Image (cartoon, rainbow, N blue to C red):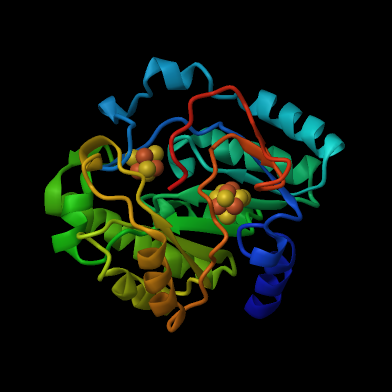
Amino acid sequence: MKESKFAHITKVHPCFNEKMHDKVGRIHVPIAPKCNIQCNFCTRDINKCEVRPGVASRVMTVDDAIEHVRKVTGEMPISVVGVAGPGDALFNDETFEFFKRAGEEFPELIKCMSTNGLLLPDKADLIAELGINSVTVTVNAVDPEIGKEIYSGVFYDGKMYKGEEAFKILSKNQLEGIEKLAKKDVVIKVNAVLIPGLNDEHIIDIAKEVKKRGASLMNVIPLIPLNKFKDYEKPGCAQISQVRDAVEEIIPVFRACTQCRADAYGVPGKEDKHLDMTPASHY
Ligand code: SF4
Ligand code: SF4
Ligand code: SF4
């Protein structure tokens, strides 16, 4: 069952099949503005989990998103509809409302989302019930000594956590969430942001752990140095290749990603378009 689902997804999903990456389209609907964690490389501010006005003002409503999908699917070949922010897909109820309606109106589209994974154990049942086919979880560490340097805050169950305690909650939920989703036959890709000097030698441990939990694919993406990490070096091609080669010994690696925006649509890298909005990075 799992194999056939994976085969189906990889046949038509541009983010799971390098050969299809510049051949089929995907559409992101930017309906998820809020985020519940603070990654030190992200320019967003948690600010009691409210979104900064500049970002929020350009986020779509669910109605607008459905209309946008209707229009775009009439204009170009689209095989996947995804929610990739600009905050965390799972922390915004609009994501679930959207997928419920999208499932009814566009049953032929693969449904996909990306998340930091904090709410995965709580939402795994709902994800499966809504027929979401693939989920990308960003896991940048499994070791608290490294993880506590990457995240400065985690807002969970009505409380803000900091430092190592915050990372431990996030990590536990990411890994348990992956395990739970994999058991429900949702195809899981794990993104890991390569941060030179911090987690470059650790990505291999992440690969081992997420493979054990049921992830099917990994995508190692280079840090875009922003916010607290603005003085970090952006990894070069040789370093990325070296890490990807090492990871590939453990789990299949996706190499065609160029980190697209939360509002991108069209065929990646070809007829790629985006809305006039300020995105957060799709980490
Ligand atoms: Fe949130 Fe994503 Fe930014 Fe991290 S990178 S703070 S998960 S929006
Ligand atoms: Fe691809 Fe991520 Fe968008 Fe899914 S959410 S379609 S994996 S870019
Ligand atoms: Fe998915 Fe990356 Fe391609 Fe965007 S650039 S569609 S995130 S694989």
- Residue 157: quarter of image: top left
- Residue 190: quarter of image: bottom left
Residue located farthest toward the bottom when viewing the structure as drawn: 249
- Residue 132 percent coordinates (x, y): 63, 54
- Residue 46 percent coordinates (x, y): 29, 31
Q: Is residue 224 left or right of residue 168?
A: right
Q: Is residue 176 visible?
A: no
Picture mark count? 0
Residue 151's place in the image compared with 206, above or below, is above
Ligand 1, by image quadrant, is top left
Residue located farthest toward the right when viewing the structure as drawn: 74
- Please report the residue visible at 74 percent of the width from the left and 61 percent of the height from the top: 12
Residue 95's place in the image compared with 111, above or below, is above
- Residue 42 percent coordinates (x, y): 33, 38
- Please report the residue visible at 35 percent of the width from the left and 24 percent of the height from the top: 50
Q: Is residue 200 visible?
A: yes
Between 252 and 237, which is closer to the camera in this rendering? 237
Between 201 and 68, which is closer to the camera in this rendering? 201
Between 126 and 259, which is closer to the camera in this rendering? 259
- Residue 271: quarter of image: top right
Q: Is residue 198 left or right of residue 262?
A: left
Quadrant (top left, top right, bottom left, bottom right) of the N terminus:
bottom right
Q: Is residue 37 left or right of residue 110?
A: left
- Residue 281 percent coordinates (x, y): 44, 40
